[in-house]
Image: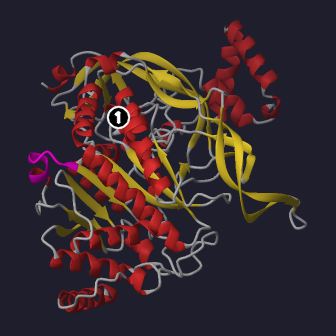
Amino acid sequence: MQIKHFLISSLLIAVYAFANSQDLLTPYEESGKTETMTYQQILEWSHKLDVLSEKVYYLSIGQSGNGYEIPMLIADKDGFKSVSEVKTANKVILMIEAGIHAGEPDGTDAGFLLFRDFVEDKIEIPDNITILFLPTINPDGCIRRSKYNRINQNGPKEMGWRTTADYINMNRDFLKAESIEIRAFLKTFNEWLPDFFIDCHTTDGADYQYVVTYDLTCLGNMGEEHNLWQKEKYLKPIKSKMDNDGFPIFRYVNFNKWHDPRSGLRNWIASPILSEGYSAVQNRPGLLIETHMLKPYHLRVEGTYKIIYHTMLILSEESKNISRINAEADIYAASEDFKSKPFPLNFESTGDSTMVIFKGVEYDIDTSKLTGGLIFNYSDIPVDFELAYFDKLEPTDFVNLPDAYIFEPVWRDIIELLDCHDIRYYKTKVMHNVNLEAYRFYNEVFSDSPYEGRQRLISFEIRTDTVTRNLPSGSIIVPINQRSARLIAHMFEPLSSASLLKWGFFNRIFEQKEYSESYVMEPMALEMLESNEDLSTEYELFLEKNPQVLNNQWVLLNWFYQKTDYWDKLKNVYPVYKFSGNYLELTK
């Protein structure tokens, strides 16, 4: 707590001093473009710019796990600072997020340079756009500052840490929303519902010429008009503008073999657990900026600044188009037409490729004397490679969407997630006996180690049953006819790579809770074998396929226990049911 009091006191002093000064050099510039802002400086500058200009407004959107403010700046030529004012004026909203990985601060410094230029009138804020800037949504990571936090990265001199204080990687948290910081972000995102979202990062990986790479969901998780707009009205002009500025850009670099350009490139569609994937299923274009970690820090900041600046201008020119496309996408996602079509949950390569020019560098490959693995030695000699780019993807794992998903009120953490994502739902007022569709799982396999703090469900077989359930009062009904239908499907459909089931939110349903004693089950099993010839054959097949259990009394008797009426009939049954029909009747 003492640190916080010190920050507040020094902040007030700094803001007062700055308000009486004409020096608007950011800490990044004062350091010779080698250092990034500390958390205290981020707060100071957020308040300074608010004080100095009626066009810039500061607010805190919440607190980190350790209680530090999460700052946001709003830039608007008319001084608008509320959602209602901006929406009434029909302005396009651009949201810029930086510092989610606090060790990758390029976007933090680039964003403050842009807002400083707004304040000094070096750059004019377009009349038809409002810009939201989150300089760090990971204050705890920002405070954990060290020159040793990013081993692969060329500057700045010191940087923050990748995760929150409780070790959550927030750029895997957009759908499951476990961190208090992401919950604050989601509240802000859904309140403002930006027309275009930018997330600023620095990548790891191979060496190449590009300072800036990007990801943008131009297929798969969005509608065709969104895809066409992003390709024709955004990517074409942004590539041209960045080329003219000396910052050619390329899609996020995924080689078929890690580090090896000659192995070819792979396209992908971002999962909704990631920022740009989450934005896409919310019917909004989401740009991931990934500057190249080996490039000098000042080039990475400048490249980030340029792509944000040009994005702002493109959005201003395209304001009517993108506003219309976003609004129509929301309406379509809530429509009967959307629900009636099979929904693709995942995508995979078709195996087809096109040839592209990739700006790499000369390199050779050695065999490590230490590990026996391959060592890639990159030079500083530029070379253009003609590479196979496996950019053709096809949808997989189609599902038919229900009218609503239903679950019992006992799953309180799922209700909290619905609130975080601003998903509409209803509650039953009395008990209802309802026919539902239920998923039952078999041969489930869990990860050997935790991922993002959760024991993930890796694979399973699935069967759909029609069941009758007595739904208690207060059961939750989540209709699919709402703008967030894509997000809802990815949350609740088990086959989605981002599903809550695969994240381990329902792991308890896979645990056996009642057991039989051997002295009870042994005679019962013998009787079952004698009276049921088919069961005897099934048992023999089980032993033939699983010879490792021949001497395992518990497993063998438990096999018989599963065949009795005592067995838990709800084990491995997904507690989120699919309902078809008039769900509003259940709310009466």
The x, y position of residue 35, in whole percent, is 47, 81
Q: Residue at x 63, y 72 (%)?
A: 151
What residue would you read off at disc 1?
Answer: 488
Q: Residue at x 15, y 31 (%)?
A: 429
Q: Is 154 located above or below residue 290 in the figure?
A: below
Left/right placement of residue 330 relative to residue 347 reads left
The x, y position of residue 238, in whole percent, is 42, 48
Q: Is 105 located above or below residue 534 in the figure?
A: below
Between 244 and 521, the one lying in front of the other is 244
Which residues, given as a range, are shown in magenta? Answer: 85-92
* Three-letter amino acid code of the residue under disc 1: Ile
Q: Residue at x 36, y 54 (%)?
A: 310
Q: Is 133 located above or below residue 151 in the figure?
A: above
* The C terminus, quarter of image: top left
The x, y position of residue 49, in whole percent, is 22, 76
* The N terminus, quarter of image: bottom left
Between 23 and 97, the one lying in front of the other is 23
SS type, badge 1: helix
Count of numbered marks:
1
